[in-house]
Amino acid sequence: MIGFGVTGLSAVRYLLDHGIRPADLIVVDRRREAIEEATELGAHAVLGDGTNRLVLTQATSGHVLHVVVAVVPDEAAVQATMLARGLWPTATIATAVRSLARVAFVRRHGADHVVTTSESAGTALVHALHKRSGLATSSPPMPSAMPWTVDQRPAQASEVGHELHDCVPTAVGVLRGSRRYWGAEAARLRLAADDQIVVLQSRTPTCHTET
């Protein structure tokens, strides 16, 4: 569970009410009070930024089957989704976003299912996991400025044949035809002429919160 605000808490409570053991839940949130609440529910709670690869790596010690992304703003949800897909390629990922315009984009960049927070998002996210992969079960204001954006661009002629990490240090993935490459797999990929490169573009840092 990446993000333990209203949506994340709703999803965790639904899981606990339907037979999931607290010990099987991992919660990542940057707010200490959220971590304390998750711990009280019995989950393994990790204080840290869910859009940080190191935090997500250290939060888990084994195979991850399901990931719920419930952070705001939507750009943070996109980044957390892409990082989760790179770290756990076979996991089923459900992501909550606020804008309907983001749904197709988030799905294309790693989410198996996307819901909007206009729905009962926590419950909807869990239902998405159940529907997609057979998961066994018996809001803060938007910031006025985003810290970064996610952009997509075609590979340039000068980059073709070179490894991604040598050409585009800020890249997080490559779209090649119908296949997506993330994380370390993308970094080692030699770029082809028709590749689309997914790049994070930084802005002035601001804080984001969990939804």
Image (cartoon, rainbow, N blue to C red):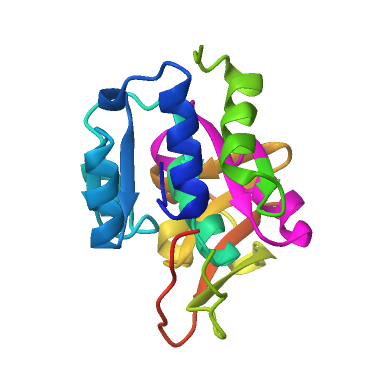
Q: Residue at x 44, y 49 (%)?
A: 83
Q: Which of 25 and 111 is in front in this view?
A: 25
Q: Give the range drawn in magenta.
A: 85-113
Q: Can you see residue 74?
A: yes
Q: Residue at x 40, y 83 (%)?
A: 205
Q: Can you see residue 186?
A: no
| Residue 84: % across, % down | 44, 43
Image quarter (top left, top right, bottom left or bottom right) of the N terminus: top left
Residue 92 drawn in magenta: yes
Q: Is residue 40 above or below residue 192?
A: above
Q: In this view, does 172 lie above or below 189?
A: below
Residue 131 drawn in magenta: no
Q: Residue at x 76, y 50 (%)?
A: 104
| Residue 105: % across, % down | 71, 54
In the image, taking residue 148 as reference, residue 160 lies left or right, namely right
Q: Residue at x 39, y 44 (%)?
A: 184
